[in-house]
Amino acid sequence: MGVNTMRWAIVATLAMAAPAWAQDAPPPSEEATRIESLVDKAAALVESQGRAAAFAKFRTRNSDWWSGNTHLFAYEQNLNVVLNPAFPQREGTNVHGQTDANGKPRHDDFMQVVRTKGSGWTTSFRSHARPSHRESGRS
């Protein structure tokens, strides 16, 4: 699935302590591998069932798609949030320019990785419950 077939990015978060950088591969852990697989499966589901049907499944708490601190969310290329079941009030908002606890423009950095590489991982830091999270996405 390439940039030409989908006009938005599906993302999942992985809570973990990590240095801040972008990378092509997930961090070396079983959980990171699971997250990357989840994002790939989510993109395939959207392609096969359509956005509305797939997003309805992604909104199901305690499912493969949203479990514990892991949930899917999706951006359009302009960084409009089109899916965020954990924080539905963010849907319909634009997150361009929003920064993490260290001042890093995390959404913009992630979308830059998606635009230039098609997929990848970024790290950002939060000031609340989770000290950091990684994002994996596909466009």
Image (cartoon, grey):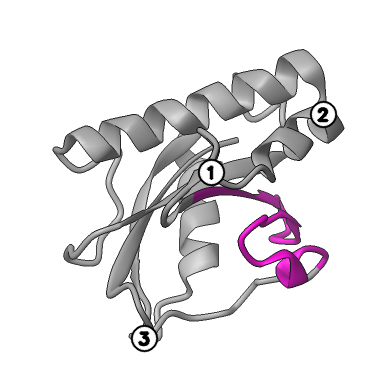
Residue picked out by circle 2: 53
Asked if residue 2 can be seen in this view, the reply is: no
Magenta range: 71-92
Task: Residue 16 in the image: state x and y as whole percent.
Answer: 23, 60
The residue under the point 30% across, 54% down is 22
Identify the amino acid type marked 3: Ser
The residue at the far front in this view is: 62
> Circles 1 and 3: CB distance less than 8 Å?
no
Percent of width and height locating residue 37: 41, 26
What is the CA distance from the residue labelled 3 to the residue labelled 2? Answer: 34 Å
Pointer 3: what residue?
Answer: 127
**Residue drawn at 74 percent across, 30 percent down:** 54
Front position among marks 2 and 1: 1
What residue do we see at 43% from left, 80% from top?
A: 100
Mark positioned earlier in the residue sequence (2 or 1): 2
Q: Quadrant of residue 35?
A: top left
Say above or below: 47 vs 112.
above
Residue 25 drawn at (x, y percent): 26, 36
- Looking at the rendered image, the disc whose residue lies closer to the viewer, 3 or 2, is 2
Cα–Cα span, label 2 and label 1: 18 Å
Residue position for label 1: 62
In-front residue for pair 30/113: 30
